[in-house]
Amino acid sequence: METSKIIIIVAMLAVAVVLCLGLFNMMRGGSPGRSQSLMRWRVVLQAVAIAVIMISLWIAGR
């Protein structure tokens, strides 16, 4: 498998894991501070995943 595809998959999995952790924390009535922290991490990881995808597309188009 191509290296860029592996990096994209890892980035998307990281976003999915943090999202699931946040949902699990919210469903069980966990700490609101932890929910906020997970939300911030999710947003950062989504930005990283989008940047990785865009860079991969840019490199592939060269």
Image (cartoon, helix red, strand yellow):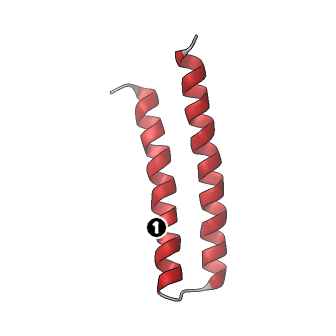
Q: Residue at x 42, y 31 (%)?
A: 5
What residue sits 60% from the left and 68% below the top? 38
In this view, which residue lies farthest toward the left? 1
The percent coordinates of residue 35 (x first, y second) are 61, 76
| Quadrant of the rendering where the C terminus is positioned | top right
| Left or right relative to 20: residue 48 | right
Residue where numbered disc 1 is placed: 20
The residue drawn where x is 55% and y is 34% is 53
- Amino acid type at circle 1 is Cys
- Position of 52 compared to 9: left or right? right
Query: Residue at left 51%, top 63%?
Result: 18
Q: Is residue 11 above or below residue 27?
A: above
Q: Position of residue 28 (x, y in %)?
A: 47, 87
Considering every residue shown, the one lying at the far bottom of the view is: 29
Q: Where residue 22 sits: x, y (%)?
A: 53, 72
Q: Quadrant of the N terminus?
A: top left
Q: Secondary structure at mark 1?
A: helix
Total numbered badges shown on the rendered structure: 1
Bin the neighbour count of mark 1 within 10 Å (Cα to Cα): few under 14, some 14-19, many 20 and up. Answer: some
Residue 41, x across and y down, in percent:
62, 61
Does 12 appear above or below 20? above
State the image quarter where residue 32 is shown.
bottom right
11 left or right of 50 in image: left
Image quarter of residue 30: bottom right
